Amino acid sequence: MEKQISIIIPTYNMENYIGKCLDSLIIPEFDEVEVLVVSDGSKDNSSAIAHEYAERYPYSIRVIDKENGNYGSCINAALPLCSGRYVRILDADDSFDTAAFSEFVRALRGMNSDVILTKFLIVDEMGDVTDEPGFNRWNIKVDRTYIGKELVKLLQRTYIPMHHITYKRDIFSQLNYIQSEGISYTDTQWSIIPLARCRSLIFKDITLYKYLVGRAGQTMAQFSTPKAIATLLKIMRDICSVYGTIQDPLSKTILQNLITSRHIAFYMCAYNIKSQEAMNMIKEHEQFLNKEHPLLFELLNTTPCDDDPDYRFAKILRDSEYSLKIKLPLIDRLIMSFRARMRHLFKK
């Protein structure tokens, strides 16, 4: 039977979570699902648990044991082995809504879009829903296929977290995709680079992914530190290197829009932790951009901040010589606060 989807599960010391993760995938349509569990040098029982599931479901589950190389190395190890029509990532401490996954696999049988977006929930350790990020601010319509200019406009200032995304595997046959290894946060690359090859996108109103937050040791818990900023900027430099190799005009336009909008988010993150060390990293990164990717450097001057389309954060940073003493005008602070509240109230 044809595999509709390949699920890549990177895991490192996740013995308390991997069983629940795999249980969430066991559906009546499981013969149409391929699961690749990548044990990234785990020192606990994660691999042994995954192998037990592989023995019970040999037609659908495969375990790849490898030395530790961090998140990106797991994707690089599994992606060439995927055989499903579609592919997506599921972190080992997260899970799918099982009923929604069954519905999703059935829907895949009649789908052909390059990218499929679905909803996700944010849950705590008890499984209680703490948030449900929505699509309203992007004005995405359910079951409508976006192509051409509409697709480019949709992706113009949009960062779509990996928890929303399912890619058609054919995208990767057209793209020499390699995720950065040895560092964290490389899901950013998964959420940006393959979209450059996207020519059609559809949103299905299915709440599929359950994203766990609050787990001890979770990398997102250390996000707002100078060390994290250094890692994020390294990831952006790697993405920019890919951008420099792309010749197709549409792919280049999509990628430069995604790159510039993500830069602004990282710059604001660096500023908000109030660390001059982080601001110095931004300055050094800007020098790299100006030298290696001058078009991206210039575009950042006109790229608006997500919270306020009239606020050009990169330009203000440059004009201030990357100072921590930037003060946002009161009217802008009020507008940004109001918009953030409205997004929170009406995001579903």
Image (cartoon, rainbow, N blue to C red):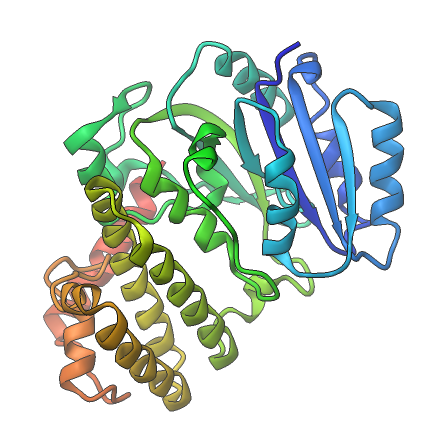
Image quadrant of residue 292? bottom left
Q: Position of residue 161 (x, y in %)?
A: 43, 46
* Residue 317 in view in this figure: yes
**Residue depicted at 30% across the width and 40% down the height:** 346
Q: Quadrant of the N terminus?
A: top right
Q: Position of residue 321 (x, y in %)?
A: 20, 89
**Residue depicted at 87% across the width and 56% down the height:** 44
Relative to 2, 304 lies left or right:
left
190 to 61, vertically: above or below: below
Q: Position of residue 100 (x, y in %)?
A: 56, 22
Q: Position of residue 43 (x, y in %)?
A: 85, 59
207 to 340, vertically: above or below: above
Relative to 122, 267 lies left or right:
left
117 to 123, vertically: above or below: above
Count of residue discs: 0
Relative to 90, 292 lies left or right:
left
* Residue 165 in view in this figure: no
In front of the other: 44 or 196: 196
